[in-house]
Structure formats: C-alpha cells, structure tokens
Image (tube, helix red, strand yellow):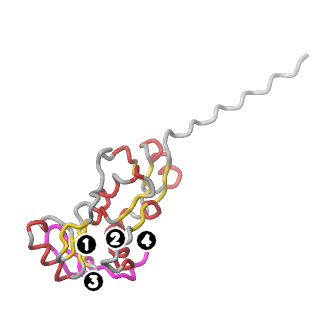
C-alpha cells in the first residue's frame, strides 16, 4: 500500500496589480529658490499640504485598496487623476510683488507623481508678506485663490483671513517636504 499523496498547498493569493509608492511627504522635494527663505517656504508648502502629507500614493485602485486594508492608511490611486494633468512649469505668476504657484514649487521623485501636485495645492499662491497677499487678492488673478504669505497670513479662496486656523508658523510640527 502506498502512502496517500500529500494535500496540495493552497494557491497563494494573487498580489494586487500595481505598486505602492509611499507617503506624499517622501515623494516630493521643494525646488531651491534664491528669492525666498527656503525653510519658511517649506513650512508654508507643508502647511497647505498638511491634510494630504501622510496620504500614500499607489498607481492603481487595487494596489491602493490592498494597502488600505493592510495598514488602514489613506491611499490615493494615481490612476484616478487625469493622466495629462501636470503642474505648471513656471511658478512665477507675478514678479512684483512676488507671487508663486504652489503646485510648481515641488519636484516629484518620479514624473508619474506630478499629476498629484495640482490635487494637493489647487489654486494656492505663495507670497512674501501679508501686504502682498492682500494686494494679490485684490488683483484680477487673486479671485478664488488660496493665498499663503511667508510671514504667516493665509487668505482662503473665499477671501476669509485671520484667526488661528488661517495662520501658519515656520515652526509647525508634523511631516514636511524635503528641500531640494
């Protein structure tokens, strides 16, 4: 009598199609500029992106779902973004007073992450001072735009400003982008 054949091992669960890239704050760096204080600029950009800094990027919905089920983290599949969406290349909207497009101030670690930048920052503009913020707000380009001044003032797209929820400091805590 021969020994019974060993039971077949269960087929391994197939891995989700796609890749998980990591948290947003690790995938982008702030481009170096010589016309602003880089530490303060990094703080301002990190402040604006704060709700999405810990979001993990994946290339597909199935990879995002698997990562979410495993870690419980918020995961964004890049396939949900329009593939042709890209941040503007030139960050300068106005040179006097200086007004910069936030979505053009960071460099993605890989070109495939670039479509996420407009999602993070929308129509956010960075200026040097609160006076510049109010000047830009009154201009034709300032309507419906979130404006962040490097001295701490934040003006929402609806024009609201002031109060503790609309001020950032360079000493903020939490995840921050690396400086290029």
Q: Residue at x 30, y 62 (%)?
A: 104
Using the numbered discs, state the Cα–Cα distance from disc 1 to disc 2 in whole angstroms: 8 Å
Using the numbered discs, state the Cα–Cα distance from disc 4 to disc 2 in whole angstroms: 11 Å
Are dots 2 and 3 in contact, CB under 8 Å? no
Are dots 4 and 1 in contact, CB under 8 Å? no
Is the residue 55 above or below the residue 158 in the image? above
Query: Where residue 92 sits in the image (x, y, percent)?
Result: 23, 67
Of label 4 and label 2, which has the lower sequence position? 2
Q: Is-magenta flag for residue 97?
A: no
Is the residue 161 above or below the residue 144 in the image? below
Give residue 179's mark: 4
The quadrant of the picture occupied by the C terminus is bottom left
Q: Secondary structure at mark 1?
A: strand
Q: Residue at x 24, y 66 (%)?
A: 124
Of label 1 and label 3, which has the lower sequence position? 1
Circle nearer the viewer, 4 or 2 = 4
The residue pinned by badge 2 equals: 45
Are dots 1 and 3 in contact, CB under 8 Å? no
Using the numbered discs, state the Cα–Cα distance from disc 2 to disc 3 in whole angstroms: 13 Å
Of all residues, the one furthest to the top in this rendering is: 1
Q: Quadrant of residue 100?
A: bottom left
The residue pinned by badge 3 equals: 151
Does residue 115 appear left or right of residue 8 in this picture? left
Point out the stretch of residues depicted in magenta: 152-180
The residue pinned by badge 1 equals: 126
The quadrant of the picture occupied by the N terminus is top right
Of label 4 and label 1, which has the lower sequence position? 1
Neighbour class for label 4 at 10 Å: few (<14), some, many (≥20)?
some
């Amino acid at each position: 009598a021969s020994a019974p054949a060993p039971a077949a091992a269960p087929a391994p669960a197939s891995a989700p199609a796609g890749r998980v890239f990591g948290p947003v704050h690790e995938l982008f760096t702030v481009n170096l500029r010589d016309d602003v204080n880089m530490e303060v600029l990094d703080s301002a950009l990190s402040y604006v992106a704060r709700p999405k800094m810990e979001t993990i990027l994946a290339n597909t919905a199935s990879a995002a779902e698997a990562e979410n089920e495993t870690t419980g983290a918020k995961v964004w599949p890049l396939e949900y973004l329009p593939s042709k969406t890209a941040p503007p290349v030139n960050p300068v909207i106005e040179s006097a007073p200086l007004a910069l497009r936030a979505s053009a101030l960071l460099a993605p670690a890989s070109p495939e992450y670039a479509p996420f930048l407009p999602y993070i920052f929308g129509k956010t503009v960075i200026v040097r001072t609160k006076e510049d913020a109010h000047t830009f707000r009154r201009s034709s380009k300032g309507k419906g735009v979130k404006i962040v001044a490097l001295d701490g003032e934040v003006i929402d797209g609806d024009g609201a400003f002031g109060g503790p929820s609309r001020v950032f400091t360079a000493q903020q805590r939490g995840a921050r982008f690396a400086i290029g």
